[in-house]
Image: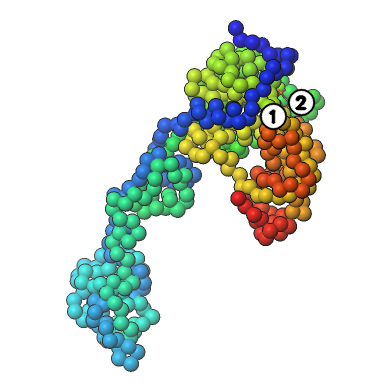
Amino acid sequence: MVRDVRMRGFAERADVAQVDAFLREHCSSLASERVPLLECVGRVLVEDLSSEVDVPGFPRSSMDGYALRGKESFGASNYDPISFDLIGTILPGSSFPGRVEAGQAVRIMTGAHLPEGADAVAMAEVCREDAAGGRVEISEAVAPHKNVGAVGEDIRRGDLVLRAGRRLRAQDAGLLASIGVDTIPCVRRPRVALVITGDELLPAGSRPHGAQIVDSNSVVLRGLLERDGAESLPFEILPDTPERIREAIADESADVVLVSGGSSVGQEDHAPRLLAELGQLDFHGISMRPSSPTGVGRIGRRFVFLLPGNPVSCLAAYEFFAGPTLRQMGGRSRAWPHRRAHFPLARKITSAIGRTDYVRVALEAGQALPLATSGASILSSTVRAAGAVIVPRGREGMAEGEGVEVILYDDEIPEAIGSGIDGAGGPLT
Ligand code: AMP
Ligand code: MG
């Protein structure tokens, strides 16, 4: 029999660390899929990749100039240039049909295939053609191999170019293009079903009226999912009716289900009981602020996160539990992806032993200022804040002036803040 906790409150609460450890242990990376080259940036590679070709695959001129036999230019100087027979031109993309013999040179452009017989390129600046273009004078010696990119200089056939687990950068994709790859084995992106519940909710894009509010949680969650490399499935807002919520939570096309709202112990909070019936409710009630009415469970291998409807709670519960899980499933690091910086606290933070707090802070005059309006329903606190300070469960609070680590919401630290501390950008860890 599933215990119905509605209107009774939480008997006991789990620790953030305990839930995190549970998720880490029970979650694994998804299977792989082949991703088109042009879509692979940011994706996680599942296999070591080696090159089947040399890059460049031909000896290549790295200058505009004249291809010749380097040895024949020895002794050339401004006062005593050496003259060569100019037998043709070679542009990038084609190969010279003949061979460069003794006393001959070929006009060559950067990136072109060095002709047979030649072993060096004299750069145009030290050469002068005669008016008829039949001869060229070289006024500086050029050693063999000079200004020539050797076969495999960039990548050699058989070289390991990228290791499994690599999150592909733009330049990685460029390198894969250069070795002739067109699809890349990557970890599949987690598919996420959003189950947005609440009789009071209007779809995003509506104007709030009467006793109704606009669903902002799905908008926030979709942004976070995008950041974490997950894909959100199409969804609709559901009323607080158990049948509809049950059906949505049971969605088998998802790897992860995020339920927003109805996660607590109120009369209309059906999700915890439904999850316990359909699968298991591993945790319900977590010792943290905000987000204490968070639930975590599973249906088969599918994780279900019950995120409180209060917007700040929804955001924090995502960051603490759903985000790391989705990143791990997608082959990324569980670690929070934010930049961090240290600042002294402008005002003390009060917490309680045994509870983890997620405190929004503004950055002012080089100090982290905890925002007074810290209610879980005040989404604007996360907009005014530059980031958050996490008060660990073992701390009763943090003192004014204490150096704290701020998890920054933005990738760039605004100049005004950076200059208030220790040079632009501040002391990053
Ligand atoms: P609940 O967790 O369902 O008890 O909701 C807690 C508070 O969050 C209530 O004030 C809800 O109106 C509000 N809320 C619930 N869902 C959303 C949502 N999707 N967007 C914005 N606020 C919400
Ligand atoms: Mg509700």
**Which residue is more in the foreground, 334 or 315?**
334
Query: What secondary structure is found at the residue carrying circle 1?
Result: loop
Task: Give the image quarter of residue 195.
Answer: top right
Amino acid of disc 1:
Gly
* Rendered view: 350 above or below 282: below
Task: Give the image quarter of residue 236.
Answer: top right
Residue 166 position in % (x across, y down): 44, 44
Instruction: Kindly identify the residue that appears in the image at 55 percent across and 14 percent down.
Output: 278
Q: Nearer the viewer, mark 1 or mark 2?
A: 1
Q: Residue furthest bottom?
A: 79
Instruction: Kindly identify the residue that appears in the image at 58 percent across and 34 percent down.
Output: 323
Q: Earlier in the sequence, mark 1 or mark 2?
A: 2
Q: Disc 2, ligand 1: is the CB inside 8 Å?
A: no
**Which residue is more in the foreground, 383 or 251?**
383
The residue that label 2 is drawn on is 212
* Quadrant in which the N terminus appears: top right
Colour mode of the rendering: rainbow
Q: Disc 1, ligand 1: is the CB inside 8 Å?
A: no
Answer whether residue 308 is visible to the viewer in this image: no
Question: Which quadrant of the figure shows ligand 2?
Answer: top right
**Label 1 neighbourhood size at 10 Å, few (<14), some (14-19), many (20+)?**
some
The residue that label 1 is drawn on is 354
**Label 2 neighbourhood size at 10 Å, few (<14), some (14-19), many (20+)?**
few
